Amino acid sequence: MERFRLKKALDMLARKEGRGTELVSLYVPPGKQISEVLNTLRQEYGTAANIKSDTTRSNVQDAITKTQQRLKLFKAVPRKGLVIFSGSIPQNGPGSERNETYVLTPPEPITINLYRCDSRFHTEHLQDMLKEKENYGILLMDASEATFAILHGRRLDITKEITSGIPGKMRAGGQSARRFERQRDAKVLEYFNRVGQHATDIFLGVENMKGIIIAGPGPTKYDFQKGDYLHYQLRDRVITTIDTAYVGNQGVKEVVDKAPEIMRKVRYIEEAKLVQDFLYQIGHDTGLGTYGEEEIRRALKMGAVRILLLSEALDIVRVTVKCSSCGRIEKETMKNKEVERFQQSLPGQPCPECKSPSLNADDVEDVVEELGEAATEANADVEIISSDTEEGQMLKNSFGGIAAILRFKL
Ligand SMILES: [Zn+2]
């Protein structure tokens, strides 16, 4: 959920665009002195004085000032560092720019020290961190050598490289050739066993191992996979087998280049399975599937939700309507784009309770976030489902984007 909240914030920030090169991104790693960073910003403020365009200059300097102000609120840089985004964002077409400043605490200690002024906020270093949690094992092999690597997010560790010891094919025929072939087969067997053993040593203890990718040029990797050389727990986690042109580091690089696509597929499969599980409950009338906002709220209250499925495309919010005279509170769900009109319609309207025209609706919360939080409190798993799969589309279009698999019948 925390990841989801950060992801959502970053997606929102990544979409923001400045009028020109005037959005400031500041990454401060732990251990750095606040005074040092303030110094850098003072220099940047001075440099910005040379910007020719009046608007851009004033916007950049404004962004730097706002960043300084936020920074000064900290006595020291937090344990995991600090990220500040500030800049003039058009609110409603050209000329409607207003400064927006965001302070974020990274989920893990940041290592980069960065000041950037650009037409966008540089969120990618935080985006990377969200992926960091997932690990993938890479086993790259052909008949001559094998390489073992682990991909932590985007960081790659080459853990081990071994050679096969298998001699090349023999050209001569006859008796000695047959003996040579037998020896060669024994070597292959010994090599495959060694590869399997190393794979166990290297991959089995890795936490959050999402999957193993087997790769390499030629047919050796398939021969290896067909045999019983991989630990059964690893065998279950092989997600794909891919052909590469090279072995060694070069080959690993080829795999890494394809990794984002592979990972997306893995997540799609997970998402599809979750929705299929829900559809099964509905289709077989087991009583363990339910959907729709009201139903889900009821099930959550009863502690009945095992897995809450929320469509990423769900663009609805929960608005709290308060009466400042009698304190009456009412919550309403509506589409994000309806909020403004709703808020504007409130002044002058009488409160249903005390009839005083004192209603306001300043408290607006994303339903995905709000339900997600309620589910976490109720010990349910929350799965955010993209609309990139057929199942995700179905969840969004046929079930209103909110569904659950239950622990017990209601
Ligand atoms: Zn009232």
Image (tube, helix red, strand yellow):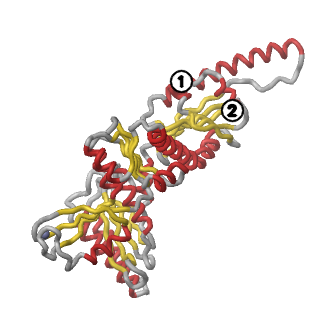
Front residue of 3/147: it is 3
| Residue 323 at least partly seen | yes
Mark number displayed over residue 232: 1
Q: Nearer the viewer, mark 2 or mark 1?
A: 1
Q: Residues within 10 Å of mark 2 (few under 14, many from 20)?
A: many
Judge whether 162 appears above or below 387 on screen: above
Classify residue 4 as left or right of residue 346: right
Q: Quadrant of the C terminus?
A: top left
Cβ of mark 1 under 8 Å from ligand 1: the answer is no
**Percent position (x, y) of residue 395?**
47, 51
Judge whether 304 appears above or below 58 on screen: above
Front residue of 349/152: it is 349
Say which residue label 2 marks: 142
Q: Secondary structure at mark 2?
A: loop
**Percent position (x, y) of residue 370?**
30, 55
What amino acid is at disc 1?
Tyr
What amino acid is at disc 2?
Asp
Q: Secondary structure at mark 1?
A: helix
Q: In which quadrant of the rendered view does residue 401 lie?
A: bottom left
Residue positioned 51% across, 39% down in the render? 136
Residue positioned 50% across, 31% down in the render? 203
**Distance in Å between CA atoms under marks 2 and 1:** 21 Å
**Percent position (x, y) of residue 274?**
46, 42
Q: In which quadrant of the rendered view does residue 172 lie?
A: top right
**Percent position (x, y) of residue 53?**
43, 86
Dot 2 and dot 1 residues touching (CB under 8 Å): no
| Residue 5 at least partly seen | no
Q: Residues within 10 Å of mark 1 (few under 14, many from 20)?
A: few
Judge whether 138 appears above or below 229 on screen: below
